Amino acid sequence: MALKVPALPLTFVVHTLGIVGLVLVLVWNIHFRGGLAWEAANKNLIFNLHPVLMFLGLIFLGGEAIVSYKALPFRKEVKKVIHLVLHALALGLGIIGIYLAFKNHNESGIANLYSLHSWIGIGVICLYGIQWIYGFVTFFYPGGSPALRSESIPWHVVFGITVYLLAVGNASLGFLEKVTFLENSGLDKFGTEAFLVNFTAIITVLFGVFVIFSVLSEAPTVEDDNSYSAI
Ligand code: HEM
């Protein structure tokens, strides 16, 4: 099933929304929340790295990795390496981002893993890791048989889209949770910061939507085939 629209213009929308989202999440955490730090007496600065790294990693680089087959004019083998490297970066930043949420909780005496966001978050990072390892072993090194590869590709696509949508949904839960904590501690519900955070979450959701549209649309015709043509 492929939408009868060319993918390339959709991937430009993806890049634009991703960069806007990245700027918004940085402005929020640096300008409104006081900045980013690995070590600090003010433990909130450690937490601030969590949304920044989760957005940059799982959402932005993860989305770019997914659309890379449709967005780039290279040979299939080159695109495969770009795809797996971008996903590795996404996964690495995601793991560090989650570590920092735990670090903030542990150094502030806050319990771990009490929220729906944190439970889904652990699920997302585990599934993302499993998807990456299975994809690496089957499609890159050592590589499965041709029969295994062609049987695996539709699953790889559907499972990848599912995990990605879970990540986007969970990031929205994270924005909601944090802004609710802040509002309960006195942040103006209709103020600039609350508005900025909700708007960042909307950009995140739109980014995810255009990633999916790009995946389901028609690849540009290039000299070689893509790794899959339809799901
Ligand atoms: C897909 C992206 C994300 C994943 C996988 C994820 C995962 C997690 C995990 C596993 C924790 C638990 C840490 C602990 O218990 O010590 C956590 C905490 C937290 N995250 Fe995220 N996160 C993501 C994005 C975000 C974003 C964008 C925000 C926006 C601010 C956010 C806000 C929070 C908050 C407020 C906490 C602390 C409260 C809690 O544990 O629920 N997260 N996150």
Image: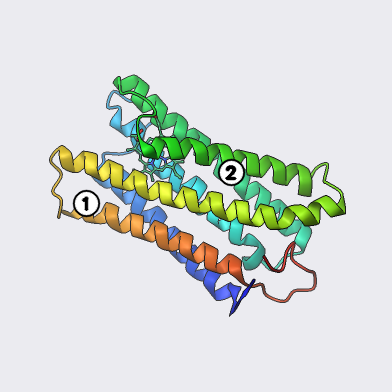
Ligand 1 - quadrant of the structure image:
top left
Q: Which residue is mark 2?
A: 89
Residue 26 makes an appearance in the image: yes
Give the position of the C terminus as an image quadrant: bottom right
In the picture provided, is 119 more to the left or to the right than 135? Answer: left
Q: Which residue is mark 1?
A: 194
Number of marks in picture:
2
User: From the image, which quarter does the N terminus lie in?
Assistant: bottom right
Q: Quadrant of residue 53?
A: top left
Is 228 above or below relative to 191? below
* Spatial CA span between label 1 and label 2: 30 Å
For badge 1, the amino acid type reads Ala
Q: What residue is rendered at 63% in x and 61% in y?
A: 68
Of tags 1 and 2, which is closer to the observer? 1
Give the x, y percent position of residue 137.
Answer: 76, 42
The front one of 58 and 165 is 165
Neighbor class of circle 2 (other Cα within 10 Å; few <14, some 14-19, many 20+) is some
> Dot 2 lies on which element?
helix
Report whether residue 20 is seen.
no
